[in-house]
Image: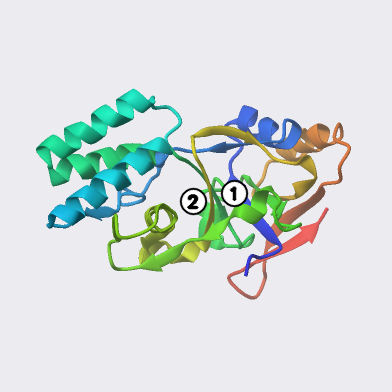
Amino acid sequence: MLPPYLYKYTSFDNKKYLHEIINENKVYFTSPNYFNDPFDCKSNFNIGSTASDIENTREFIFKMLEEDTSLSSELIRAIVNRIGSKWDGNLIIEEFRKTLANRGIYCLTNKPDNLLMWSHYGDSHRGLCFEFSTTPNGSFFSNANPVKYTDTYPTIGSYLSWEDCGDTSFLVKSQEWEYEQEYRIISNYAGHLEYPKELLVGIIFGCNVAYENIELVTSWISSRDTEINLFKTSTNKEKFKLDISKI
């Protein structure tokens, strides 16, 4: 079940990026090519061995490439014919991964108080965390899906539907990343997408945030006509945990 809110940790290093989220209602979907995990979105592809397997894979590759809006139909057919003439397993995997790399992914989490996330993505607790609403159903952030964590490297093939292949490729990661409790929204292309501004409902500042950065964000949200609640984390005095208080 999708949680009522999803969160995005970030730093103050790129203030243009922050301003886009807060005042232009845009979020940036990143190509998997730029992810920090070299295994991410790089599933193995099971081609099969029979004549039927080969033909099914050719058709699958064609449908897959049709999803790539940056390719013309002529180029798609040329790629499929090239793959079919050589029938090189490595070539199929290469073309499949190129297509995946053209997709855009927006990564979120259901945890606003994760110590490691604040350290790794929130600039050692000097950054901030956006709080987005996932309601109503069918709204922008309700399209997020949870990542599954496993020790088994994912394998896909033409025996799966394109949707299932996409889920396996984009939504399966190593158990080493399970602490992130990640959710992902998938787009057909990388780049900016606009979200309904009322879905940004909160901003949480890290416990080491600079006061001038709080002032900066406060000045930005003053021009908005939808409410954004402001919070700040603090270190708990008894446990290794963060407390979140409204400011």
Which quadrant is home to the N terminus?
bottom right
Kind of residue at disc 2: His
Residue 185, x across and y down, in percent: 55, 49
Rendered residue at 25%/49% (across/down): 57
Rendered residue at 68%/41% (across/down): 210
The residue singled out by tag 1 in the image is 9
Image side of residue 103 versus residue 225, left or right = left
Image-quadrant location for residue 159 = bottom left
Residue 216, x across and y down, in percent: 76, 33
Rendered residue at 63%/27% (across/down): 16
Residue sitting nearer the eye, 197 or 50: 50
- Looking at the image, is 71 positioned above or below residue 54? above
In the structure shown, which secondary structural element does the residue marked by tag 2 occupy?
Answer: helix
Residue sitting nearer the eye, 171 or 84: 84
Mark whose residue sits in front, 2 or 1: 1
Image side of residue 237 versus residue 60, left or right = right
Rendered residue at 58%/70% (across/down): 240
- Looking at the image, is 214 positioned above or below residue 141? above
Kind of residue at disc 1: Tyr
In the structure shown, which secondary structural element does the residue marked by tag 1 occupy?
Answer: strand
Q: CA distance from mark 2 to mark 1?
A: 9 Å
Residue sitting nearer the eye, 117 or 200: 200
Residues tagged 2 and 1 counted as in contact (Cβ below 8 A): yes
The residue singled out by tag 2 in the image is 120
**Residue 176 got which mark?**
none
Q: Is residue 33 visible?
A: no
Residue 151, x across and y down, in percent: 30, 68
